[in-house]
Amino acid sequence: LRMSGYRILLITTDDGEELDNNLIQPYLKERLVAIVSATKPTDTFVENCLSKQIQLIAFNRNWKIPTLSSVACDHRYGGEAAAEHFITNGHINIGIVEGPTGSFVSNERCKGFKNHFKNLNKIKLFHEIGNFTYEGGFESAKKLLKKNITALFCADDTMAFGCLDYIKENNSLNEEQKLCNSIQEMGTTFIKLGQFLSTRPDIIGSEIAKKLESLQDKL
């Protein structure tokens, strides 16, 4: 969107928080033409956007709100793309942080990832459940790094932030430094996340940010 001349406003929300009028300042809303959201909007917020002719788009969500458009990424292809990246870079021992049991998004992403290794017997996969939470990602990274993995696949960005923070806090260890260079967020959404993080050394530290710079030539 930036390459097409649009100015982007990025807003993060806590788990369970709804998108409402308090999250966007009135003077900013006057300048918006569209909102792409993975956070469910309140009915009042939807009505307010309609009155101001702001297009509201649900990203990877299906809230069944008649006035909303919806877009979704190909979760299975995202997993396959991440797996191919690891194969290209010669990784053998790979960790997977999955979402909660029964999650369609996690199942599809992990299925695409695992199936891509189906005929590669030398690849060893190590699993942990992160439940789509920051804490889950943090704890999963702590366990998986003991397996001597050199790459880590996360089924969503929230868990990836937890993994990255654990790596950042323990980046004096050689294997964890290698892992910082190997983390690949799945598909378009997570490659973009990695690209964003590479520009924010204030969040993840200059060392990790520099190692993520290689993602800038993806997509």
Image (tube, grey):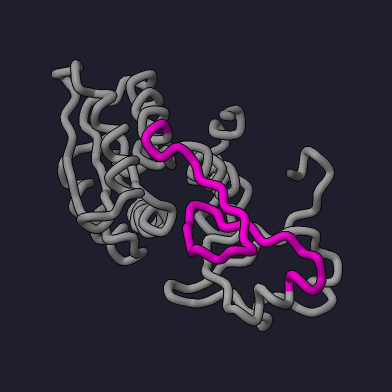
Read off the magenta span. Answer: 49-77
Q: Nearer the viewer, residue 39 or 134?
A: 39
Figure quadrant of the N terminus? top right
Q: Is 57 positioned to the left or the right of 143 in the image?
A: right
Q: Is 45 positioned to the left or the right of 159 in the image?
A: right
> Is residue 214 depicted above or below 197 in this figure?
above
The answer to whether residue 55 is visible is yes
> Is residue 22 depicted above or below 146 in this figure?
below
How far across and how far down the image is residue 119, in percent?
A: 19, 16
Quarter of the figure with residue 109 = top left
As drawn, the residue found furthest toward the front would be 66
7 falls in the magenta region: no
Figure quadrant of the C terminus? top right
Q: Is 142 positioned to the left or the right of 133 in the image?
A: left
How many numbered dots are placed on residues in this image? 0
75 falls in the magenta region: yes
The answer to whether residue 207 is visible is no
Q: Which residue is at 74% across, 55% downward?
A: 8
How far across and how far down the image is residue 77, in percent?
A: 41, 31
Q: Which residue is at 57% across, 45% downward?
A: 198
> Is residue 74 depicted above or below 203 in this figure?
above
How far across and how far down the image is residue 93, in percent?
A: 21, 31
Q: Which residue is at 62% across, 61% downward?
A: 68
